[in-house]
Amino acid sequence: MGKLILEINEKYKGLSPIIQISKDTALILTPPINKDYWAFRVKLHKDQAILAFTKFGPLCFGIGFAIEDEDWNTNLLYSNNPERIYSHILENKKYDEITKEMCIEAIILIQKYIMSFLPENECDRCGFHRNCYTYIKYRENAEAK
């Protein structure tokens, strides 16, 4: 396996438009999704990559395969355990040459990059992610410093 490289899409404009319906209700629209709808990616083999894109806010990224022949829209939040993400998206792997180890490494590269710009207390404000993999790793890294 060659060295995996994280790519950043400088042209990516992935924030979902949010329309406030009332004080307590908002409508989130899906932006046009195409081959360029990715914020970060790691190429694996030929035209296949693992990528991340925003789902429902600026720090809410989904991770999945670039080409989803088997099941379109198969991704999980970046905050899940890498093994869980891999198991969930596996059906879209496409090539036998892509190994589990490559995929896990690519997922971790993306997660580490996301964590590198995660505001220090961002997870503290988000009840949904309070027990997520990224939060736990973020706290472990902070405590180790």
Image (cartoon, rainbow, N blue to C red):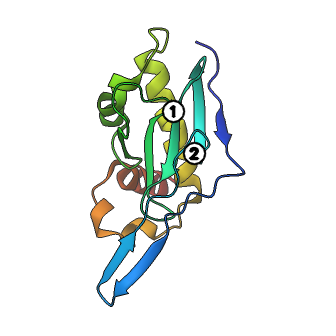
**Circles 1 and 2: CB atoms closer than 8 Å:** yes
Rendered location of residue 76, percent (x, y): 35, 44
Q: Quadrant of residue 82?
A: top left
Local packing at callout 1 (Cα closer than 10 Å; few below 14, some 14-19, many 20+) is many
Give the x, y percent position of residue 94.
Answer: 44, 17
Type of the residue with mark 1: Ala
Quick one: SS at disc 1?
Answer: loop
**Residue drawn at x 65%, y 30% as measured from the top left:** 5
Q: Is residue 116 left or right of residue 18?
A: right
Residue 26: quadrant of the picture: bottom left
Quarter of the figure that contains the N terminus: top right
**Three-letter amino acid code of the residue under disc 2:** Trp
Image coordinates for residue 41, horizontal then vertical, percent: 58, 37
Give how far apart the Cα atoms at labels 1 and 2 are.
8 Å
Residue closest to the far bottom: 23
Q: Which residue is mark 2?
A: 38
Residue at x 35%, y 69% (from the top left corner): 126
34 vs 104, nearest the viewer: 34
The furthest residue to the top:
96
Residue 34 location in percent, x, y? Answer: 55, 43
Task: Assess disc 2: are there few (<14), some (14-19) or many (≥20) residues with their C-alpha within 10 Å of its C-alpha.
Answer: many
The residue depicted at 50 percent of the width and 58 percent of the height is 31
For image coordinates 53% across by 67% down, the residue present is 119
Give the vertical position of 94 relative to 122 (above or below). Answer: above
Question: In front: 84, or 32?
Answer: 32
Q: Work out whether 20 lies above or below 68.
A: below
Q: Nearer the viewer, residue 84 or 89?
A: 89
Identify the mark at residue 66; answer none if there is no mark.
1
